[in-house]
Amino acid sequence: MTTKITPAQARDLLADGALLIDIREHDEHRRVRIPGARNVPLAALARIQDPHAKAVVFHCRAGSRTTANADRLQASADCAVFLLDGGIEAWQAAGQTVEVDHRQPIELQRQVQIAAGALVLTGVALGFGAQQAFFGLAAFVGVGLIFAGVTGWCGLARLLQFLPWNRVG
């Protein structure tokens, strides 16, 4: 069974040699991270291969991903497993140090939300102001968001990945 711990408890475990694993996506980790955290996105998580680790502390942004995947995270390690309650947001709120790289773009998920919202608003505004056919743009984006939620595949995110500011290199 995994145990949720506070940022102070996590800091103490890390000082005693625990391993810190950030399960967020690479774009999230590049933007803001806890110093010393290894980035292993949840989709790529396998067995934790560190014979010296006495404990592993997993974290995400707000604690939802770690909580939802607690069994999987527990099964990935042969030592004690802890979840940082509240994720990196709680870590920051507790005054703990984070590294921020403002040169990195905002997270892809937020870019999708901004782009989808802008497309819906544009479709509605043009639908009322110019031609009713533009309401179709809002409907198209809505269908795309439903499809992304059901399948886990987002076409808009795939397109945004290719924009110059999102290229890793």
Image (tube, rainbow, N blue to C red):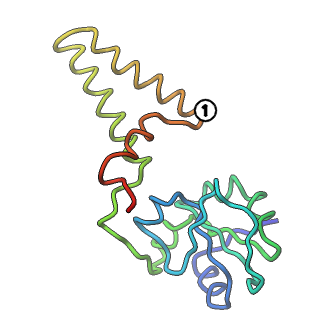
Pick the quarter of the image with the N terminus.
bottom right
Residue found at the very far top of the displayed protein:
132
- The part of the image, by quadrant, that contains residue 19 is bottom right
Pick the quarter of the image with the C terminus.
bottom left
Location of residue 62 in the rendering, given as x and y in whole percent from the top left corner: 54, 59
- Look at mark 1 in the image and give the residue it sits on: 151
Report helix, strand or loop for mark 1.
helix
Image point 28% across, 21% down: which residue? Answer: 123
- The part of the image, by quadrant, that contains residue 13 is bottom right
Query: In the rendered structure, which amino acid carries the disc numbered 1?
Result: Thr
Q: Is residue 130 left or right of residue 18?
A: left
Q: Is residue 98 left or right of residue 165?
A: right
Image point 67% across, 74% down: which residue? Answer: 57
Image point 74% across, 83% down: which residue? Answer: 53
Image point 63% across, 57% down: which residue? Answer: 42
Location of residue 160 in the rendering, given as x and y in whole percent from the top left corner: 37, 43
